[in-house]
Amino acid sequence: MNSYKNTSEAVLVEKMQRGDEQALVEIIRRYETMIARIVIGMLGNTAEAEDVGQETFLRFWQSVGTYRYEAKVSTFLTRIAINLSINELRRRKNRYAWLELTDDKPIQYEFTDPQDAFQQADVTDQITHALTHIQTDQRVVVILRLIEGYSTRETADMLGIPLGTVLSRLSRGLEKMRKILRNTEQQ
Amino acid sequence: MNKNQEHLLVKSLLNETRQAEEEQLTHLLTSNTHAIDSLNDWKKIYLLLQNFNPQFSRYFIKHTLNRLAHQRLIQQTQRDLYKWMLRLSMSAVAAVFLLLMYVIWQENSLSIDGLLGITNLWSGDFTNLLANY
């Protein structure tokens, strides 16, 4: 059924450039989880996140004709996903600008030991919640550096910011996440 | 904690501390309990983040392909509309051209009156037309 399972990325891109949709399907299969981590990390587990995820692959499909391997497919997709997520956050902010969307409810998550946490189904929810409550610029850096595993230099290059800024955003983001995750313990 | 100390802690978390920074880090961790607490919690968060594995719905690929098909349909409709508009405008240009040719052929000249078809009309025509009413 999946004839492109062992096909190299370069060949898949060539096939996409010739309009082969099955090659796109294979690219989606390979990178769906990565894009889900980025987009859901950025936007939370919402319907918009799935839309942005789909749009990421559609944009890649549309721009594949001009794709010249300057960046790996994963990096190219990551950039698209981050940009689209930021656009979506801006749209969301404008859409709800007239509403006060402050969540005064105390956070109901516990900061559990990771060993135990791995076994819990809601670890993803905890992290999503904490991630979506830190500033966007910090969130992007946390996702790229700590979740996707890009190096500090790659993260800085991708976002066009100095190394020191990456480190600052990481420390502030982590500190905020720490407070969010500890919130219940302190109450 | 100041900015340098924060950077030092993050570098430690990422195993990016240089030899020269190791001593500063040791000093920081022995003198600042808040730094130790932060670093320990950051390590736990980092571990959680590395296991962050959300999923899209199981129909993600199907939905993406549906959107692609929908986009294609829209593009095709736009192309068809453009072609139709182009054909329509070309027909209009051809009609205007034929009209001009006809006027020139009939009148041996090109004038506004000729175009409006009122070349041989004198003022009495209106009176004659209205005379029957």
Image (cartoon, rainbow, N blue to C red):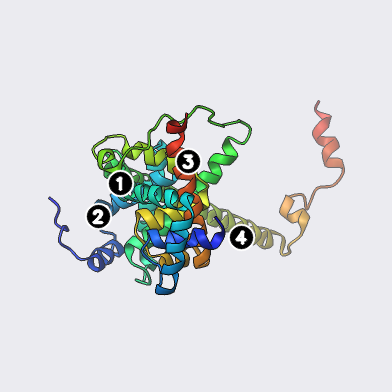
Q: Which mark is residue B97?
A: 4
| Pointer 1 chain | B
**Residue A91 at least partly seen:** yes
Q: CA distance from mark 4 to mark 3?
A: 77 Å
Label 4: how many Cα within 10 Å (few below 14, some 14–19, many 20+): few
Say which quadrant the N terminus of chain B sits in: bottom right
The reply to whether discs 2 and 1 touch (Cβ–Cβ < 8 Å) is no
Please tell me whether residue B81 is drawn above or below residue B105 in the rendered image: above
Residue sitting nearer the eye, B69 or A156: A156
Label 3 crowd bin: few (<14), some (14–19), many (20+), radius 10 Å: some
Identify the mark at residue A30; answer none if there is no mark.
Answer: 2
Amino acid type, callout 4? Phe
User: Which of pointers 2 and 3 indicates the residue nearer the eye?
Assistant: 3
Secondary structure found at label 3? helix
What is the x, y in percent for residue B48?
Answer: 33, 46
Note whether residue B84 is visible: no
- Closest to the camera, between mark 4 and mark 3, is 3
Work out how far the residue at label 4 is from the one at label 1, CA to CA, in angstroms. Answer: 48 Å
Q: Dot 1: within a 10 Å radius of its alpha carbon, few (fewer than 14), some, or many (20 or more) residues?
A: some
**Secondary structure of the residue carrying numbered label 1:** helix
- Mark with earlier residue (4, 1): 1
Which residue reaches farthest front?
Answer: B31
Query: Which chain hosts label 2?
Result: A
